[in-house]
Structures are given as C-alpha cells and as structure tokens.
Amino acid sequence: MQFPVKRGAPVSQKSACAILPLFDGGPLQGVTLDFDTATAGRIAQFVKSGNASGTLGRTAFIHDLNGTDADCALLVGCAERDEFGAKQLRTALGAAAVALGKTGIGNAIAYFAHERLAGVDAYYSARLSVETFSSKLYRFDELKSKPGPRPKFSRLGLSAPDSDAARKLRRGAADGAAIAAGVELARDLGNRPANICTPAHLAGVAREIANNYEDFEIEVIDELEMQKLGMGSLLSVTHGAEEPAQLIVLNYRGAPNGAQPVALCGKGITFDTGGISIKPGAKMDEMKFDMCGAASVLGTMKALGELNAPVNVIALVPACENMPGGRATRPGDIVRSMSGQTIEILNTDAEGRLILADALTYAKRFEPSHIIDIATLTGACVMALGKVYTGLFTNDEELAVRLLDAGRRSLDPAWRLPADDEYGESMKSNFADFANLGARYAGASSAAHFLSRFADRKGWAHLDIAGTAWLEGERKGATGRPVPLLVDFLLNL
C-alpha cells in the first residue's frame, strides 16, 4: 500500500474519495467545512437529513461533490471534538478503512492532519493512519484454495496543511509503514499452522530478514550445540518432538560499534500440546499461537530493517515443539539449565519459561543494556488483564516507565504487575534448586519471578502476551502485538 503526502488546497486535491472528519455537537469545521462551502452546503444538508452523524466510528459516503476534485467523500464520525484523541482517531481510521475496503475505490486522501487534536501531531496522525489502514485491510488467505476477493484499496494520501506538517507526515508514514510490515509478518507467522510454521520455518524467516536488509547477521544453533552449551532446560521441552529445536540468533547492528545492544528473547513454541501434562482437547488448535512471542520479535527485527534504525538489537528465538512421546520429559524430572541452576519439572505444560531460561542466560554473553523477553506465558495473565493489556514485569523502574510510555504512544498498552521475591517462595523444591511451577494463585507473577532468576534484575523486563497475541471467535487470528510497542521503545531509546 502507498501513503503519499499531499499539499495544496484540500478541495483541489484529486482523489477517488476524500476522508473527512465529522464531529458531534456543533457546526461543520475545518476541512469538512471547506468541502461544504465548495459544494454550496451539500454536506451540511446531507448531515441535517440524518444520513451522517458525528457518532464515533459511523461512516457515510456522499457523492456528486461538484466544486471539488474528489469523486466522493467518506464522512467519518469522530465524537465530540474535545474528546477526540489518539484512541478515537484510531477508531475513526479503522471505520474508514473497513468502509473503503468493501467498495471498489482504489485510493483516498485523509484530512485528519488538518485538525488540531490534543496529543496527536502530524507525525502521530500519519503513523496511526498507516498502521490502522494496514491492519484493517490485512487478510490471511495464503492457504485457501479459493481466496476471497482482496480489497482494491491501495493508496491512502495524507493531506498536509503546511510544509512543516508535510515533513512530519512523511516521517510518520515511514515509521508506520515499517511497523505495519513487522506486524504483518508477526500475524502471518502466528496464523500459519504448526505443520508449516515449524522451528525450521522460523529459522528460514529469520534468514530471509538477514538477507533482505543491511546490517544483519544470523546464527542458528542446533540441538548438538545446545547440548555443548549446557542448555538442559531448553532441550527438556523438545525431547518428545520429532522436529529439531532451533535457537535463532539474529543480530542487527544499526548503531555505531561499541553501543550496547538490546536483547529481545521471544518464546517460540510452534505447537504446545502440554507434553506429558497434556492440555484438554478444547481449543488446543490455538496452541499454534504459542510462538507469537517469537513472531513479534522477528516482526520487530523486520521493522528495524525497513527503517535502518540507529540501534543495536540481538534477537534470540528458542524455537521447538512441546510434544508427548517416549522420550518426553516427565513430571518430576530434574534438569540443569545453562546457568547451572537445577529445575524440578512439576508440570511439562509450564514449558515456555524453560526455553526462555536458557535463552536469557545466553543473551547475557552479548552484554546488552536491556533484556526483554516476550512470551505467551500464562493463562493467569489473561485472567488478570484480558485481551486489552500486555502484562509487564520488571524490577527496573526506568525500564518500566520507558515500556509503559511506548505502549501508550503506540496504542499497544501494557500494565505493570509485580514479580517480587515473595512470588518465588511457592517454587521451592526438596530435590532441585527450585521448581518450574508455583502456587495456584498469581501464576503470572510467579512465572515472571522464575524468569528473573536467569536475567540480571537491572535492565530486564518480561512481557506476557498470552492475552494480547491473538483473538478468538469470529475475529480469530494473530494480532501482531507487541510489535508496535517494541519498535516505539527501540526508536525512543
């Protein structure tokens, strides 16, 4: 999709459709008023007749705009002007994208940057526009024998009121397009079934990223090398699987030599049966999404490559399947992690923390400034936060603020939860250093505390995306979260 920036009088900008904001509780304003004046009051009469309103997200097409160079206009409800901010803008943009996607219209120009909105400058307006339209027009039909018709919409112009706004719009569109590309990759990977999206498939995608963009290096560590490194925790998860495990190490050097990298560790369980502690059959198909942490990390790396971002980032993806079998790890088995710490495995379905434990230990050899792990880790986090917020756990106050701010800016929000030492008390073991499972309550916090044992407390954070990585029901599919949060965080370091 293309996102050109347009200059000049709005009513003289040629397009198949002008996307115009319509606010509640007052007369027409701004560019919408300009179009109304040019059409001798046609828009005001259209609204007065009840064909359109300022109700947030309501859309209505109006044709025959004589006096303008637009073939038609899409009036988009934006609620009260004083209440209109980033969230409302995303809702309005999403409604516009859905409406346009149902038509044969191929291009449009959006005029939201002409509105002076609290907390939304031209850069942010463009970035949200690109991300939202890309998300709403996304389709995953690569495995259908007869894919449905794709939206014909392919170009969204962004109108700039002045040259300064034009510069900000171009930068916002570029950042938004890169983030959207990363989100799309993460969604594609998450939506692919486990018989296609295997550990080897994830490694292949990582190699494509390294080959397609500058400043990347890649290494894929196999099981034999993992054994030499002492990664008994990671290997314990894959014992019952036919598919070989992979530890993907994707290194991006966009900053000068000597700048400390950020390490991103993404859980890559490409299918999770629970192992010997097998899951119930209901909704087990959704366990193909258990690699969405890995998908979000690879999506973030693609976005950095698109942007030539001036940061250094190490992506580590421990990828494997968790399957039952004659060689599978049993409840009660004790394994030794790369860190030297021993773990009693009380439940083989608490496997994500086991593969991340060795990945976090391995990450420290790169001396990163920050280590952030991303995982569909616990159902307890879903119970606590639902599908709205990603769970954030960290004992680093500055890092917490940075990640929470990135979530707010990107509309990919996180909510901080505790991971204090007290949450580790229930993981005591009579036979090993500790167990991989704690008490029934506060499972998300005890899981986070488990991970903290393998990462230095300063500069480490854990993002539990079990609730936000995919949707259920009619909208079932991967969301691509938290790629927007991670890219925003890295761009603002």
Image (cartoon, helix red, strand yellow):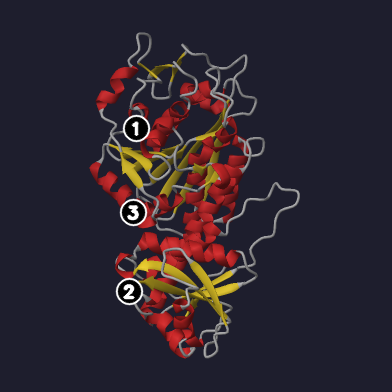
For label 2, the residue is: 116
Which amino acid is tagged 3? Arg
Q: Nearer the viewer, residue 176 or 279?
A: 279
For label 1, the residue is: 455
User: What SS does tag 2 mark?
Assistant: loop
Which amino acid is tagged 2? Arg
Residue lying at 38% horizontally and 72% vertically, measured from the top left: 23
Answer with left or right where residue 340 lies relative to residue 458: right
Q: Residue furthest front?
A: 49
Q: Which label's residue is closer to the chain start, 1 or 2?
A: 2
Residue lying at 59% horizontally and 25% vertically, measured from the top left: 281
Q: Nearer the viewer, residue 133 or 290?
A: 133
Q: Quadrant of residue 452?
A: top left
For label 3, the residue is: 408
Which amino acid is tagged 1? Ala
Residue 20 placed where, x, y %? 46, 75
User: What SS does tag 3 mark?
Assistant: helix
